[in-house]
Image (cartoon, rainbow, N blue to C red):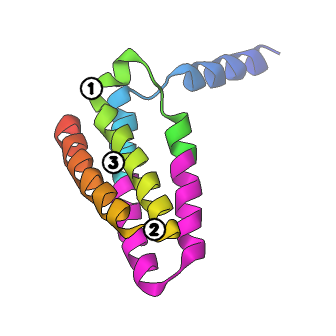
Amino acid sequence: MKAVLAFLALVLSASAMAATPRDDAVQLLAWLKHTRAEINRAGRAGDTVALQRIQREAVRRSDAWPNDLPHAPFMDCHTALTDQVSFLQAYQRKDYPWRDRQARHFRDDLASCERAVK
C-alpha cells in the first residue's frame, strides 16, 4: 500500500511541474517553423486537406495558449499563430491581398517571437 501511495505522490508531483512560459514559447516557435515549411509544401502541391489539418491544429494551439502575465513577454508567438490561422483562412477564401498581408504580419511576429525566446 505504501508503494502505491509513493508512486501516486510521484506521479502527481511530476504532473504538477508545469513547463515555464519560455518552454511553451520555444515549443510553439518550433511548431510554427515546422508548419511554415509544411504550408509552403502543401500550397505548392494544392493539398487543401493538409492545409485544413494544419489550420485545425493551429486553432487548437491558439485556444490552448495561456493568457496570463508570465506568458506576456512571448505574446508575439501567439500573435504569429493567430496570423498563421488568418493566412490559412484567406488562402481558402482565395483572398490573395489579405493572404499576403497576413503572411507579412506572420513573418514580422515570428521574428519578434524568435527575439523574445533568445
Q: Residue at x 45, y 24 (%)?
A: 67
Q: Nearer the viewer, residue 104 or 107?
A: 104
Q: Residues within 10 Å of mark 2 (few under 14, many from 20)?
A: some
In the displayed structure, 44 sits above or below 94; it is below
In the displayed structure, 89 sits above or below 29; it is below
Residue with the mark numbered 2: 91
In the displayed structure, 96 sits above or below 79; it is below
Residue with the mark numbered 1: 73
Dot 1 and dot 2 residues touching (CB under 8 Å): no
**The magenta stretch spans residue 23:** no
Q: Residue at x 46, y 86 (%)?
A: 45
Which portion, as a residue range, is magenta? 31-59
> Where is residue 52 shown, x and y percent of the image?
58, 65
Query: Counting residues from the N terminus, which is met first, the one under dot 2 or under dot 3?
Result: 3
Query: Counting residues from the N terminus, which is met first, the one under dot 1 or under dot 2?
Result: 1
**The magenta stretch spans residue 36:** yes
